[in-house]
Image (cartoon, rainbow, N blue to C red):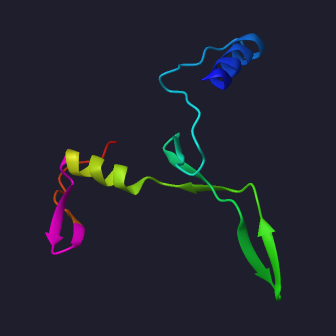
Amino acid sequence: LAILKEIEIAVDKELNMQIHLDKSGVKHHSDGVLFLGYRLLGNYDSKLNFGGIQRHLSNRIKFSVPTQRLLKRYMNKGFLQKAKKGKNIKYVARRVDKWIFL
């Protein structure tokens, strides 16, 4: 991407830093991005009501924790197991004899 190349040149020139191209990217905001363990999503065109007056908010960022990723890591470490009953899936604690280190 041309824009990523321009960003790489600007960061190298102005900040004297290198961009790791495998970890960097330009994505559409609707997909969200994972940054420092949080999922960042664009929350555009939100509407709030204040006493009957409707307001539009724009350019808001929504932070969320990627819970499925955390649950998968807990399952791989042996702390949780999946319990399926029909369409329902529950995560059940398995071990209490270990410390949790992620």
Where is residue 84, by image quadrant?
Answer: bottom left
* Magenta segment includes 74: no
The C terminus is located in which quarter?
top left
Q: Nearer the viewer, residue 102 or 45?
A: 45
Q: Nearer the viewer, residue 72 or 78?
A: 72
From the top left corner, tell me how far across and down residue 30 is, in percent. Answer: 57, 52
Q: Tell me which residue sits at (54%, 27%) in the image.
A: 24
Q: Tell me which residue sits at (63%, 23%) in the image.
A: 4
Residue 94 in the image: above or below residue 10:
below
From the top left corner, tell me how far across and down residue 6 is, in percent. Answer: 70, 19
Residue 83 placement, left or right of 41: left
Residue 81 in the image: above or below residue 56:
above
Where is residue 92, by image quadrant?
Answer: bottom left
Q: Tell me which residue sits at (43%, 52%) in the image.
A: 66
Q: Tell me which residue sits at (59%, 43%) in the image.
A: 28
In the displayed orientation, state which residue is furthest to the front: 2
Residue 91 in the image: above or below residue 23:
below
Magenta region, mostly helix, strand or loop? strand
Q: Which residues are magenta?
A: 77-90
